[in-house]
Amino acid sequence: MNLLEYEGKGLLAEWGIAIPRGIPAKSPKEIVEAFEKINSPAVLKIQVPAGGRGKAGGVKIVKSRNEVEAFIETWYRKEFKGHIVTEILVQECVDINTETYLSISINPRSGHMLLMFCSEGGMDIEEIAEDRPELLFKMELNPGQEYREFHFRIALSKLKLENSKLIQVAKTAYKLYRCFVDNDLCLAEINPLIFLENEDILALDCKIETDDSAIFRNKRFDSLKREINDEYEREADEIGVTYVRLDGNIGVIASGAGLSMNTMDLISHAGYKASNFLETGGGITSTLMSRSLQLVARSESVKAVIVNLYGGVNPLVEAAKGLVDGVNLLERKMPVIVKALGNQQQEC
Ligand code: GDP
Ligand code: MN
């Protein structure tokens, strides 16, 4: 689960990392009230689990009530990268001296935690990682070892940071590491991690992702398990399939996660792009199949659908019935290509 920025900041603050004063608000009235409490100037930040808000205007410094209202007009209940904006964080505007980048993620190759720091953080960190990777400091953290603050200080001392900054970054890295481990996170990113004019360090933005396989043992997250607000994903949840919306134009239905990814690979190998990931799991019924087809074919951009089924525990006859029903119900005609192998293959 991706935490919203203010939820993530709440977690960081509990682990001792300084954050700016902010008030999350859920309605236009609450947003205006929060702005008045913050006592201008403030930064308004749309709360969606997606990055790149700053470049799109979803993070804005405002000085007057008129500007707050204009921001609400532009963003409230509007969509950003597939998410409807229903919450806005109203935060005190701070004077930034320098922006840096600090994160811990999991290195998929080694399975170890990976701490990354860059003295030039901010909105263009991806470009820095690409063009000037030498600026990015990396430290692998062994899961079997207990790290202390001095480990981070020694490792980071390779960088040419002023002493006072080195100490602050190392302290923050240690707190972030504790927060990461104590909460079973798979990503904890602070971008930017800033120094104020008075040299204090502050997490100005953060992106926190929990490991959902471990989430049951952290009561703290119970209240954060949110309702799905993407209408396609909500419908998929109702149908009982696992679904992710993508931006290609070939719909995919498959009877397993591996098979679905494989089908997507074949689609891109042929020079096209999948419009979704959908895996039915082992509980195919004709209704599930018919509804899944409606779901993946609905978007105007979808030009064809590929159905790739393996009949192991799944009954292929039911699947075939559902597909015939589903094709008859389609609002737009389009090719639907089906491959079904395994249990009940002959009867189809
Ligand atoms: P993102 O674009 O979604 O990552 O949103 P961020 O929260 O990182 O904000 C983007 C940029 O807005 C930051 O890199 C800062 O440069 C700027 N910004 C955000 N808050 C403040 C603030 O309080 N004061 C100033 N001066 N700039 C801010
Ligand atoms: Mn950011």
Image (tube, rainbow, N blue to C red):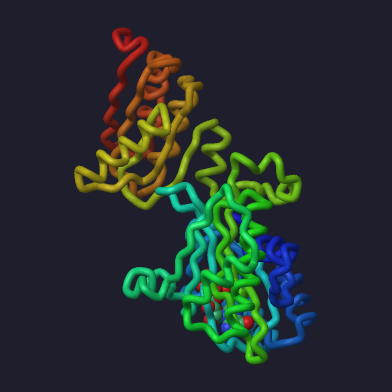
- How many numbered callouts? 0
Q: Can you say which quadrant of the picture contains the C terminus?
A: top left
Residue at 71% x, 41% y is 217
Residue 73 seen in the figure: no
Does residue 65 appear in the picture of this structure? yes
Q: 152 and 19: which one is in front? A: 152
Relative image position of residue 232 (x, y in whole percent): 50, 44
Return the x and y of residue 221 as percentages of the image width and height.
Answer: 71, 49
- For this orientation, the residue located farthest to the bottom is 197
Residue 277, quarter of the rendered image: top left
Residue 316 as seen in the image, left or right of residue 146: left
Ligand 1 shown in quarter = bottom right
The structure residue drawn at horizontal position 59% and vertical position 84%, both measured from the top left corner, is 163
In the rendered view, would you say 39 is above or below 112?
Answer: below
Residue 2 figure quarter: bottom right
Residue 214 position, x and y percent, is 63, 41
In the image, what residue occupies the spot 43% across and 75% down?
124
In this view, the residue in front, 30 or 8, is 8
Height in image: 213 above or below 321? below
9 over 210 or under it: above or below: below
State the residue lying farthest toward the left.
270
Q: Which residue is drawn at 45% across and 53% down?
A: 107
330 and 75: which one is in front? Answer: 75
Residue 208 to residue 315: above or below: below
> Which of 238 and 343 lies nearest the eye of the viewer?
343
Q: Is residue 47 left or right of residue 328?
A: right
Query: Where does the image place residue 9, in percent across and percent down from the top left?
Result: 67, 66
| Left-right relation of 328 to 61 | left
